[in-house]
Amino acid sequence: MKVLITDIHHGNGGGHVTYILGLLRGLSHRCDFTLAAPTTGRLYREASQIPGVRVLPGFYTARVGAALSEMWRLRHFLRRESFDIVHCNGSTDHRHVMIASKMLPKPPVIIWTKHNTNRVHSLGNRLRARFGTDLCIAVSDYVAQQLAHSDYRRCTVERIYHGLDLEHYRPVSRQEKQAARLALFGPGVTEDCLVLGSVGGTDLEKGWLLLVQAVARLEPALKQRVRILVAGDPPAPAVCEQVQALGCAQQVVFPGLVKDVRSVLAACDVGFVLSYKESASYACYESLALGLPVLISNAGGLPESIEHQHEGWVVPCGDVAAIETHVRDMLCQKYCLHTVGKRARVRAEKRFDAQRFSLDTYQAYLKAKTGS
């Protein structure tokens, strides 16, 4: 099966890029993949290292003059290559593919993955749903419901959860945890410290500052036992000033963008994703895979990740008091974090396995191609 994957990201791309890299690695033995993405992005760079995947520059701009030229070149490329499927991952590349494919002698089947919770009732979405989509992939039930209540309901919608290499993401030994803590905090972290970590990024919409606010409300004896790790782009000075004003500068560490998130999560007792909006979260799944309980908000598709009080805890979005209560209970050993963490790993094995993700996506490809 000959498949073109398109994406718009110039920079790191976060989970969106991780999703596509997972597809390329998991299905390169089944599909003849070509990726067309901006040369300045992490996706282009890392995909170029995957054997059997052809990686080409792809540009998808909104400016009319440039966009028309890009669509014209894309049309000639699609005609020459005769792809079975084009799998789009954004709105701009989706539009380009829709227009470039029209009136081709052998147009490709067009699949679109919705990676976010943005509304889908714009004119552009209506046009793409009617004229440029054969099948939609939703990354959570929440997103699938959004699509079902939009013009995309005319298309086949497949809900496919993300997948991880569970051999790569695995619980660490006590010795590995101690070494990771020493590397990140130095010798000042005692055994009774509670380390909460997120690899979801430092954007404020990820909700990590809510955790800092919750910790700031703890009495000093409990507060001094908490450490918070937030991996991602270094936050702006104004954000660091907010952390300082809350009296938590000693509690929070920003390790920056890390090549391997295991180096951060290995140091943690609990993972957290407290986003204001989220369709699905690799940061959450990676924590589960490492055997960490997770503290998450009820935003979007996040609550589908766990069963509340079984593999972690779900709090109302933006509720600092609820976050404080759970952190206090963790510090006071109300929860057996080891037991909750073992259940977290089982959850990852059952729902977020890379092989299941790849197979489900391949079955969606076959369904779209055959029209069955």
Image (cartoon, rainbow, N blue to C red):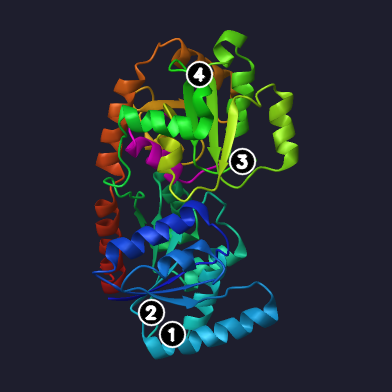
The x and y percentages for residue 247 are 69, 21
- The residue sitting at 45% across, 9% down in the picture is 332
Alpha carbons under labels 3 and 2: distance apart: 37 Å
Q: Nearer the viewer, residue 350 or 301?
A: 350
Alpha carbons under labels 2 and 1: distance apart: 8 Å
- The answer to which quarter of the image holds residue 334 is top left
Q: Secondary structure at mark 3?
A: helix
- Look at label 2 and name its amino acid: Pro
In primary-sequence order, the first of circles 3 and 4 is: 3
Q: Nearer the viewer, residue 7 or 367?
A: 7
In primary-sequence order, the first of circles 1 and 3 is: 1
The x and y percentages for residue 129 are 49, 66
- Residue position marked by numbered label 2 in the rendering: 108
- Residue position marked by numbered label 3 in the rendering: 205
Tell me which segment is drawn in magenta.
Answer: 277-294
Crowd tier of the residue under label 4, counting other residues whose Cα lies within 10 Å: few below 14, some 14–19, many 20 or above? many
Q: Is residue 352 visible?
A: yes
- The answer to which quarter of the image holds residue 2 is bottom left
- Look at label 4 and name its amino acid: Val
- The residue sitting at 25% across, 54% down in the picture is 355
Closer to viewer: mark 3 or mark 2: 3
Closer to viewer: mark 4 or mark 1: 4
Alpha carbons under labels 2 and 4: distance apart: 51 Å
- Look at label 1 and name its amino acid: Leu
Relative to 246, is 313 on the left or the right? Answer: left
